[in-house]
Amino acid sequence: LAQVQPSGSGIRPHCRVESRSARPPEAMAFVKVLKNKAYFKRFQVKPRRRREGKTDYRARRKMVTQDKNKFNSKKYRLVVRFTNRKCICQVIYPTIRGDMVVAQATSAELGKYGVPVGHKNYAAAYCTGLLIARRTLKKFGLDEAIKGKEEANGEDYHVEDDEHEQRPFKCILDVGLQTTTSGHRMWGALKGAVDGGLHVPHSNKKFPGYKAQEDKGQEPEYDADAHKERIFGNHLKEYMEMLQEEDPTKYEAHFAKFIENDIDAEKLEDMYTEAHSKIREDPDFEPKEKKGITHERTDENIKSSDGTEHVRFAKLTLEQRRAKVAAKIAAAQAKLMEED
């Protein structure tokens, strides 16, 4: 209870406050449950590929959305992805049913063009971009009209600046979740596709050799020769030479596949130059020959014509699963009856 003095008396009112520890348990403050049944009934889950962390839907929405005044015209994307072993490039357009692939090229195909190893570096990414460009243009019948830039010197090139009877094939670069850092291998694939004749809107700000302005009023610098060195693998050449001199054991371990294919630092530039010319001559994809192996199945055992055997469990139907459960229950009941 509080004893309050009348106002103006000059005496400060005082209160007798009971301690919180003296409160009985049932007098606790009310805590509102936020995640109640109504919350979960209205909860909307994210798309599956968002939950898996595979698709940036904000970026995809911008790349896929087509203007209504363009009706049903396709909006193409140049998709570039890197795995632990290779570089993958695809030209894709979206539909209601899903994305449709027009053409695909991987750096694993570069063995056909004289690059047996090193399929995920900058130079290999450039070759893969060049391959997808020439393959796509050939599919649309534009390979003779649009040659692109035949000399890979690292300088800026935009195919739309040249005069052609037909408009160039336009597509947007799609890098997925990869951070667009300066000098990344994805820019090698982009440069290869652009030099191959695809119209991909871009600037040189992320290319190797670009130097931003240091002071206000200055112009940025772009060193095309530095980019050319990356395209022909000179950075790899320097690392191989350095490692060969300082640590031969590490060199033999890191570049075992290069040594196995008789490729040293001096042969890299010629190897990539020949690959560029071979890609332009024949960009077609050659599927592997089918081995013609047949399989015979007897219940869960599979015998192949090449002499191998495998065991693959057949999926049970609903009736079979129910019968299996009923048999287990009957067996358990019979065992209990015997014990009694």
Image: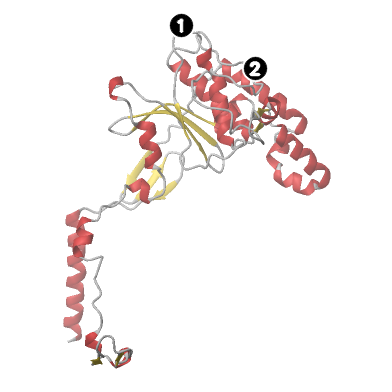
Location of residue 150 (image quadrant): top right
Is 204 displayed left or right of 323 in the figure?
A: right
Q: Which mark is residue 300?
A: none
Mark 1 vs 2, N-terminal side: 2
Q: Label 1 belongs to which residue?
A: 165
Residue at image position (59%, 36%) is: 185
**Scheme of image coloration:** secondary structure
Is 329 displayed left or right of 144 in the figure?
A: left
Q: 209 or 165, which lies in front?
A: 209
Residue furthest right as drawn: 245
Quarter that holds the N terminus: bottom left
Amino acid type of the residue that numbered disc 2 sits on in the rendered structure: Glu
Give the number of the mark in front: 1 or 2.
1
How would you rate the neighbour count of disc 2 (Cα within 10 Å): few for under 14, some for 14-19, many for 20 or more?
few
Q: 26 or 97, which lies in front?
A: 26
Q: 241 or 67, which lies in front?
A: 67
Location of residue 267 (image quadrant): top right
Q: Which mark is residue 151?
A: 2
Quarter that holds the C terminus: bottom left
User: Picture coordinates of residue 65 (x, y %)?
Assistant: 33, 31
Q: At numbered mark 1, what does the secondary structure look like: helix, strand or loop? A: loop
Amino acid type of the residue that numbered disc 1 sits on in the rendered structure: Glu
User: Picture coordinates of residue 105 (x, y %)?
Assistant: 50, 28
